[in-house]
């Protein structure tokens, strides 16, 4: 199996988001970065498939030179190759991103080893566009399914399972090659080992400079959501507060008198 996993460098969750003065991007000076959680699961799923069936995992990202760190994290977990579609760090819309990935896939496959499976995260943790896997599949003429939380590969086909509304599962069979977008929870990603990190440092990263494609969305500005304040009523302290607590519970319907 020759598997390509597409990942995205995103701000680590839990950090305070601050915008630049022109409101066009996030001020990243004090932020840590990681791979989107769905895409961490995509890397893990690809590595598990290759461990069971043999083959090779290639990880790809579009981003600034610093995104090399996320590629090496994926290689530390078992990916053999990495491709960096190097940009100046500016935001690319889903149309331009998908076009760059499609061109990279075509160029890599021209070397004589086409991909059997393209894995994506269901959506990026920062923008949540949901568009890139579908656009890439459409451009390459491949079958695609998203929201996947179960995957089996065999006999030239992929069996993909997606949770259905109201319980149960939707099951899809896709001929390979195919594009599949997985959701967090399909597996539990492993932590990179120290030997894995040392090996990843020595591996080469293929660098490509893509040309952005016009015609997609045009960003006007970013806006932070308004902060919501919280309030608390102090009912008292010690035994003296008991009547006030009982009265409050009765008022909100928790206590039946």
Image (cartoon, helix red, strand yellow):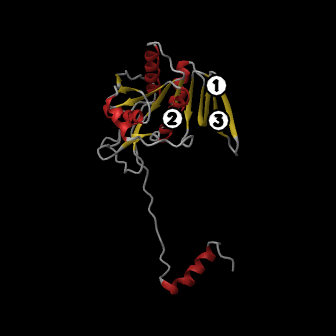
Mark closest to the chain's N terminus, 2 or 3:
2
Closer-to-camera residue (218/47): 47
- Residue at position x 36%, y 32% in the image: 200
Q: CA distance from mark 3 to mark 1?
A: 11 Å
Residue 207's x, y, as percent? 34, 23
Residue 162's x, y, as percent? 64, 37
Looking at the image, which residue sits at the far bottom? 240
Instruction: Tell me whether circle 3 and circle 1 mark residues in contact (CB < 8 Å).
Output: no
Q: CA distance from mark 2 to mark 3?
A: 14 Å
- Which residue is under mark 3? 161
Q: Which mark is residue 174?
A: 1
- Horizontal arrangement in the rendering, residue 173 relative to residue 84 (left or right): right
Instruction: Tell me whether circle 2 and circle 3 mark residues in contact (CB < 8 Å).
Output: no
Closer-to-camera residue (255/34): 34
Residue 109's x, y, as percent? 47, 16
Residue 14's x, y, as percent? 41, 51
Please identify the quarter of the rendering in which residue 213 is found. top left
- Which residue is under mark 2? 42
Instruction: Tell me whether circle 1 and circle 2 mark residues in contact (CB < 8 Å).
Output: no
Mark closest to the chain's N terminus, 1 or 2:
2
């Amino acid at each position: 199996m020759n598997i390509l996993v597409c990942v995205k460098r995103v701000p680590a969750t839990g950090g305070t988001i601050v915008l630049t003065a022109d409101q066009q991007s996030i001020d990243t000076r004090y932020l840590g970065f990681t791979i989107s959680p769905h895409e961490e699961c995509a890397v893990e799923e690809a590595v598990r498939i290759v461990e069971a069936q043999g083959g090779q995992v290639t990880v790809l990202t579009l981003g600034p030179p610093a995104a090399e760190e996320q590629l090496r994290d994926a290689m530390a977990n078992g990916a053999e190759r990495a491709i960096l579609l190097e940009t100046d760090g500016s935001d690319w819309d889903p149309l331009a991103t998908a076009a760059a990935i499609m061109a990279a896939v075509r160029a890599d496959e021209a070397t004589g080893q086409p991909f059997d499976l393209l894995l994506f995260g269901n959506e990026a943790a920062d923008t949540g566009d949901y568009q890139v896997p579908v656009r890439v599949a459409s451009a390459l003429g491949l079958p695609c399914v998203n929201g996947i939380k179960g995957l089996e590969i065999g006999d030239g086909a992929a069996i993909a399972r997606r949770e259905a509304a109201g319980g149960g599962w939707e099951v899809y069979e896709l001929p390979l090659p195919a594009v599949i977008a997985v959701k967090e929870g399909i597996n539990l990603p492993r932590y990179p080992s120290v030997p894995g990190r040392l090996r990843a440092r020595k591996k080469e990263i293929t660098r490509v400079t893509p040309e952005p494609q016009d015609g997609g969305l045009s960003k006007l500005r970013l806006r932070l959501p308004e902060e919501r304040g919280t309030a608390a009523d102090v009912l008292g302290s010690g035994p003296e507060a008991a009547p006030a607590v009982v009265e409050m519970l009765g008022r909100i319907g928790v206590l039946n008198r």
